[in-house]
Image (tube, helix red, strand yellow):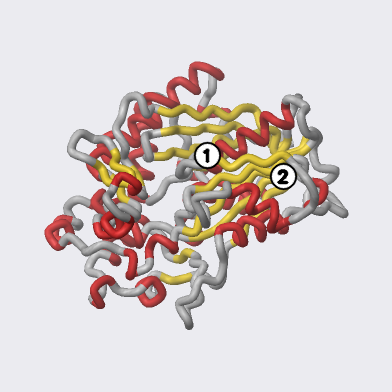
Amino acid sequence: MSVYITDLAAFLPNQPVSNQQMEEILGMVNQLPSRTRRIILRNNKITTRYYAIDPATGQTTHTNVQLTAAAIKGLTPYPGFSTADIECLSCGTSSPDQLMPGHAPMVHAAIGGGPCDVLSAAGICTSGMSALRYAWMNVALGLTANAVATGSEIASSFMRARLSGDVDQDKVELLEKQPALSFEADFLRWMLSDGAGAAFLSNRPAPAGPSLQIEWIDLLSFADEYPPCMFAGAEKQADGSLRGWREYPSLADAVAAQSFLIKQDVKLLNDNIISVAVEKMLTRIIQKYRLKAEEIDWFLPHYSSDFFRAALAARMAAIDFTIPLERWFTNLGNKGNTGSASIYIILEELFHSGKLQKGEKLLCFIPESGRFSMCYMLLTVV
């Protein structure tokens, strides 16, 4: 059965935060201005982002659940729609408000509407796509007539100065020569932001306006080939394994070891993320679906930093799959890197832009560096 995305909504908390305001809101580590912020921002090309933080008081303004619920309530797939009409709710995030219960039932409670099928998708950036894939399969199999899928993040909760580790001054000196160091725990606070997106899926196109027919969603893990690259709630050991926070003698010891910070193995990321995305994943997709670059009208990549843009384009060209940059669409620069929510927020802006024409094809790309998972999705405008 064909499945259509008939509406998309996004919710970004509070007012956009400029590069100059970031440190004032997040706080200074060790009461010292960051020496790295400008270098990192120059490389990631992000000029504004959003935080669920009141800049005047420093208090949190929204939970992840509230961000997600606000995005869902922004959906208007047809006149008279209400949350009571939702038959399946599938929510992905890497930053739920609690360990238990799952994120999706918490969101369900926030939006109300009556009993429905719910799924909480864990992970990092691809968790939002795992949620979308579950929603798609539900409708495609005829289990439900519709579904809502979401991606959401409250990354600022990890990025406050009081939770940040000490900055490695030796790495600060190397940052100009090695921009990839931006992805270490010390520097990730200048990369991530808050937001949520939601998609309404139906077994029929929208009665008016464009819909996006889901042709396929392919999501593969390459965890059998690579050690952990991005992690939180654990510390990476010399043998590449993770020591989870519950394995410490006490919670205080886990906190002291900074095991709750989001961290990334920079060398592993830099050496592998593009090759896994292109040579290991995209080549499979091209062969499986006989995909041709000239048939793609819009390429929607979720990358965490503009630092990866040129490398991604070059590797795609190397396998003879060149999509001209004028057909790439991203809003990283003004919406920020919102992790699992990013592809929803990118799609939402393009969907409501008036630029889409009937028959156009959209290729979406969503990588995850946790243990290297890659997702590609093809949509057709109808």
Q: Residue at x 57, y 63 (%)?
A: 12
Whole-percent x and y of residue 54?
51, 76
Q: Residue at x 16, y 57 (%)?
A: 171
Q: Along the line of sight, which residue is nearer the eye, 351 or 59?
A: 59
Q: Along the line of sight, which residue is nearer the eye, 42 or 185?
A: 185
Q: Along the line of sight, which residue is nearer the eye, 299 or 261?
A: 261
Whole-percent x and y of residue 302?
47, 45
In the rendered image, which residue does mark 2 sit on? 200
Task: Quadrant for the N terminus, please.
Answer: top right
Q: Is residue 356 positioned above or below 162 on the image? A: above
Q: Is residue 332 positioned above or below 134 on the image? A: below
Relative side of 215 to 278, left or right: right
Q: Is residue 156 positioned above or below 106 on the image? A: below
Q: Is residue 115 in view?
A: yes
- How far apart marks 2 and 1 lie (CA) works out to 21 Å
Q: Residues within 10 Å of mark 1 (few under 14, many from 20)?
A: many
Whole-percent x and y of residue 48?
46, 66
The amino acid type of the residue labelled 1 equals Phe
| Label drawn at residue 299 | 1
SS under mark 2? strand
SS under mark 1? strand
Whole-percent x and y of residue 246?
35, 47
